[in-house]
Image (tube, rainbow, N blue to C red):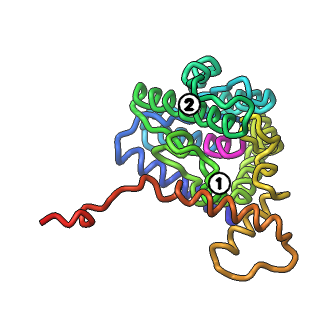
Amino acid sequence: MDCEKVFETMVSHAIEYITANGLHAGVLGVSGGIDSTVVAYIFKEVQLRLKERHGYHFRFVGVSMPTETTDKNEFRISELVGNAFCDIFDVLDITDEARSITLPHVEISGSVNNKFRIGNVKSRLRMIHLYDYAKAYGGIVLGTDNYTEYLLGYSTLGGDALFDYCPIQYLWKTEIYELANWFLAREISRAKWDRVHALSESISIPPQAGLGITSTDLEEIGAPSYEIVDTILQYILSGEDFPNDINEEWIKNVARRWMNSEYKRNHPVVIEREDFNFE
């Protein structure tokens, strides 16, 4: 992948969109994970170019929203990222809010489904806050979904699957890492050490949802690496036969998540007007 070309395309597209729509801010949920860090890097550059080349005032707002299940190291990295790339950065602990929303009379204590349910509440609560920030600053909510996670349904409807603008939606997870490493090399050459620190820490931490169900996203997916996950998905989409060197169990695990999350890619379901056969 030509990282420089991809980066320039993202930045120029965002600048055109922002100026065409008279937007004043971009609001990003900063988790410390690689996806939000890459989006933070992109929009820091967008903000700088808007000011330097167009005289356009654009605020870049980052918000970290930890809960009791948030990995402490990932939260620490979110602060590094927010302070390195955002001109406004806030931390909101939403633990108590999430607990108050979850209805106890339908709770199934100790079940995996219950953990997913509480996790969905947290994700949707975060999006409520991000959209409130966007309204306050006259801007948009930025998405952090990549193509791998989109195909696996690795997002919450009404939560992190909801956003206004996402520069990385059609990049594979492996390409996200490739881009992040290119960003890192770029910042090392410029001696921007706060950015180098934030990027290197984010690259090194294993992706995790923070729901307390599994240690890492790959453990939940059931595959050993994103190179394998992306390869399996690419074969599924192409319809070609899988090579013999890919473990059948990994193929089944990835294919199952892809099939079971189809509803998220076709949402909402509605009845078309012509189906009513109005006379």
143 sits to left or right of 186: left
82 sits to left or right of 132: right
**Mark number for residue 50?**
none
Residue at the (59%, 39%) spot, across then down: 44
Look at the numbered disc 2 and give the secondary structure of its residue.
helix
The quadrant of the image that shows the C terminus is: bottom left
Would you identify the image quadrant in which residue 254 lies?
A: bottom right
Look at the numbered disc 1 and give the secondary structure of its residue.
helix
Q: Is residue 112 above or below residue 96?
A: below
Residue at the (69%, 62%) spot, across then down: 256
Residue at the (70%, 75%) spot, across then down: 235
Q: Tag 2: residue type? A: Arg
Residue at the (67%, 35%) spot, across then down: 114
Residue placed most toward the observer, 150 or 264: 264
Residue designated by label 1: 149
The image position of residue 151, as x and y in percent, is 62, 60
Residue designated by label 2: 126
> What is the span of residues highlighted in magenta in the rendered image?
33-40
Q: Residue furthest left?
A: 279
Would you identify the image quadrant in which residue 230 lies?
A: bottom right
- Whether residue 36 is in magenta: the answer is yes
Q: Is residue 159 visible?
A: yes
Q: Residues within 10 Å of mark 2 (few under 14, many from 20)?
A: many
The quadrant of the image that shows the N terminus is: bottom right
Q: Residues within 10 Å of mark 1 (few under 14, many from 20)?
A: some
Q: Main secondary structure of the magenta part?
A: helix
The image position of residue 115, as x and y in percent, is 69, 35
